[in-house]
Amino acid sequence: MPVGTQATIKGMTIEHVLATGAEMVLSNTYHLALRPGHEVVRKLGGLHGMMRWEGPILTDSGGFQIFSLGDLNKVTERAATFKSHFDGRVIVLTPEHSIEIQEALGSDIAMVLDHVVALPNTNEVITDALARSIRWAKRCLDAATRDDQARFAIVQGGLDETLRVQCARELATMDFEGFAVGGLSVGEPPPEMYRITAATTPELPVDKPRYLMGVGTPIDLLESIARGIDLFDCVMPTRNGRNAMAFTSHGNIKIRNAVHREDTRPLDAECPCLACKHSRGYLRHLFITDEMLGPILLTIHNLTYYQRLLAGARVAISEDRYEAFVIDYRFQQARSKKTADDSPDVL
Amino acid sequence: MPVGTQATIKGMTIEHVLATGAEMVLSNTYHLALRPGHEVVRKLGGLHGMMRWEGPILTDSGGFQIFSLGDLNKVTERAATFKSHFDGRVIVLTPEHSIEIQEALGSDIAMVLDHVVALPNTNEVITDALARSIRWAKRCLDAATRDDQARFAIVQGGLDETLRVQCARELATMDFEGFAVGGLSVGEPPPEMYRITAATTPELPVDKPRYLMGVGTPIDLLESIARGIDLFDCVMPTRNGRNAMAFTSHGNIKIRNAVHREDTRPLDAECPCLACKHSRGYLRHLFITDEMLGPILLTIHNLTYYQRLLAGARVAISEDRYEAFVIDYRFQQARSKKTADDSPDVL
């Protein structure tokens, strides 16, 4: 899912998003509750009507902001209390209110409000947040009124496999349409994330989608699919694109680098996207001159890259050759390290 | 012509530009000579290849920067000397060099280097700049080597009709494919601009296009067409769009205004553009949250507005009812003043 925090995937028209192959997008409850306000979104036709996006939309619950806004909030059993990051206004978010907001936004999938904590952390803090997340999940279910909106629970438990399994088992007994693995991709090493994902997914119903929140790099997606994940969201393709980094089948490209100045080649000769109809030299020029079209084109390219990668993964799975597909991907990227301009994966 | 100063119409893909109805675009010699450099543009396939724009492209000559960069330059008979506005580098621009750059850029129409001065100014300064502009026009013609590039001369002469007529007559004897009226729209009242345009165009060949540089508001365009002008460029539709102002058939709209917060109507019910598939409330939200899609959509809308207005003008001319067309336009806009939110024409 491309991320459309404020009811827009930054710089993209809906036609651009569709052309990347994306079928589903994510939007953010916390941001939209602040601006323009969920009642305004409702009046403007909900997220679907506002954005003109006809595919499914998933909204997060605001839980991630409990973690990411850090000092600006506090959590009690009743609610999370935020200080708005842009005007200091105090917002009290209960599980019931999170569902009410998401119902007003009119997303197809609402996430339960969960209590995300920083990692590493003490076992006490993690256990407390996990137990609260389970109680809040139940309150979200009880508060829901829309038949046309699915609800996904979120497994917490830090990097402790026992806690993760316990949380997953409890949530699996409740009436959710899907399950997310939350509280990962918050700074821990990728192998830790893979380990926890692998421990968690076997405890979740096989006939319901599993969503790994906020992940990740291309290889993170492939490794997590191997561990039973179906659905992802991440700002990486869009944010990195805006910051002049392109993912390609032959390694990452930092397009501001002087080496691209007179390069007539496209970013990726195999890519059918709009950016790849232009030369690297032109794309560099757009970034050097701070032209909006640079971020626009690299966002299109990176979203297309992610969608094509996962389309390839789906085919490989259906043809029962997924392991070879991942090995091949790792090999191609490693071989390209010498020819690409050696960008880091994450900006 | 939409303005693509740095080889991109800000925020637009080529597909967006085409969808507005635009057939021709403008780009800027001075900016492109600095970044990425005209030899780089040549290597990247010229402006057409870089931008993927297949229609005609007109490049200005750098003459306007002699005026607009003010203290950063000085003019001698041989050349204009600039201090680059972004890195202080000194650039010496002769008429010959301007043509050389434009040939490297590969535009379809090159403008001669002219000497633009601020208005009002003394008769002595204006006459001196006019005489130099004529000599430079001749030098540009002599320097040109490309058979596939047309060259347009530029009439100067400030707000003095006698000087304008004299300049137009001299240039009309030379072998140019078209003629521009320059040095206007630099702060003088619109009636002054109309008066000078009306005095100048009768002196220009009837079978060659006349281009009024840097103009203007919708009504400026209509009034100038009535005075014999065929071609315009202006940043107004794009710049105003980026600054949250929309031109509509029922008056101008400042989309940031709170009155639009819950408005489900499009900007203009008669407009077929992408922005008008969304609600005013959503467009306002995009600007309030500083999302790129706001400027993108309002740029699309304003360019579409300008193109539809001039398409209507062309039909009215061919049906011999142009005067009624302009009166009708003025009437519609005046009637709308009460219902629109009373934005100024220019931001």
Image (tube, coloured by chain):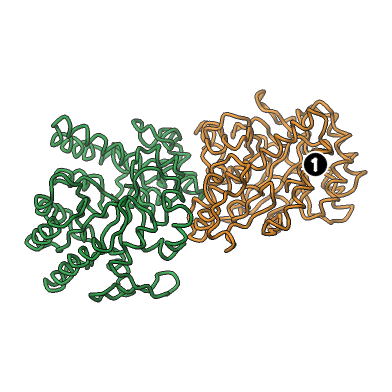
Chain colours: A green, B orange
Q: Is residue B314 left or right of residue B298?
A: right
Q: Quadrant of residue B77?
A: top right
Q: Is residue B267 left or right of residue A43?
A: right
Residue B251 in sight:
yes
Q: Is residue B35 left or right of residue A347?
A: right
- Closer to the camera, A107 or B142? A107
Give residue A249's position: percent from left, percent from top: 29, 36
Q: Quadrant of residue A71?
A: bottom left
> As displayed, is residue B160 above or below residue A62?
above
Secondary-structure class at tag 1:
helix
Give residue A260's position: percent from left, percent from top: 41, 41
Q: Which residue is mark 1?
A: B326
Q: Quadrant of the C terminus of chain B?
A: bottom right
Give residue A145's position: percent from left, percent from top: 31, 58
Residue found at the far top of this picture: B147
Give residue A98's position: percent from left, percent from top: 32, 64
Q: Chain of mark 1?
A: B
Q: Quadrant of the N terminus of chain B?
A: top right
Which kind of residue does numbered mark 1 sit on? Val
- Closer to the camera, B45 or A147? A147
- Closer to the camera, B128 or A175? A175
> As displayed, is residue A165 above or below residue B216?
below
- Closer to the camera, A80 or A304? A80
Which residue corresponds to the image point at 72% horizontal and 31% vertical from the top-left?
B151
Residue B77 in sight:
no
Q: Is residue B92 left or right of residue B49?
A: right
